[in-house]
Amino acid sequence: MKPREVVVNDLMQSGFRYWLTEPEGRNFHPDFRPELSPRQMLELGVFGGRYLTDCRAEFPASWFEKAKLCHERHDPALNFFGVLASQPLALWRARGWIHEDDPRGWFQWYCRYYAGRRCGDDERQIRRWRAIRRHIAQLECNCDYGDLQCRPRQRQALLQWAYDSRRM
């Protein structure tokens, strides 16, 4: 694949540049096996529909064809489980979880990684993704398989980290 430069101009980044060096959705780190693509996540309903509303031009249009988005506000009703399962971005910044290249957080990193970007923050983000698995064990211990009403906030949080909690 010939590397392709992406130039970002949105509300959070102006003139930011990165390179796509891998084919979309392929050649992931062996420890990183997300169950959902960004397109699937957006179609299911994540982050109250507010995520990526001002930066659609950066990603393939197909990702947004059936996306549940709300440009005006964060609307938990748009989430697959209809609940709030996100922390404010300010909290993520205060805890040092936000890398300057991806000011919107993990999902922005994942969208760019899925699109083919590889960067110096990949290992940290993959470690964070793996750490979220602890919620899977809690669902398995406390919920009957397929009971989507059991622990909806945890299930929504897992969806927002590309784990398909509908299959648990």
Image (spheres, helix red, strand yellow):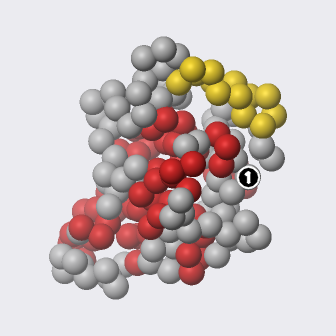
Residue 78 is situated, as x and y percent measured from the top left of the image, at 56, 75
Q: Quadrant of residue 74?
A: bottom right
Amino acid tagged 1: Asp
Report the residue that reaches farthest toward the bottom.
149
Q: In this view of the protein, can residue 86 be seen by the observer? A: no
The foreground one among 134 and 30 is: 30
Residue 159 is situated, as x and y percent measured from the top left of the image, at 41, 62
Residue behind mark 1: 54
Q: In this view of the protein, can residue 19 be seen by the observer? A: yes
| Residue depicted at 54% across the width and 36% down the height | 112
| Residue depicted at 22% across the width and 77% down the height | 146
| Residue depicted at 69% across the width and 57% down the height | 53
Q: Quadrant of the N terminus?
A: top left
State left or right for residue 84 relative to residue 147.
Answer: right
Does 91 sit above or below residue 27?
below
Residue 126 is situated, as x and y percent measured from the top left of the image, at 41, 37
Q: Quadrant of residue 100?
A: top right
State left or right for residue 151 relative to residue 111.
Answer: left
Q: Quadrant of the C terminus?
A: bottom left
Residue count near mark 1 (Cα–Cα under 10 Å), binned few <14, some 14–19, many ≥20: few
- Tell me the element at label 1: loop
The foreground one among 126 and 111 is: 111
Does 61 sit above or below residue 120?
below
| Residue depicted at 78% across the width and 37% down the height | 9
State left or right for residue 19 relative to residue 146.
Answer: right
Residue 165 is situated, as x and y percent measured from the top left of the image, at 32, 66
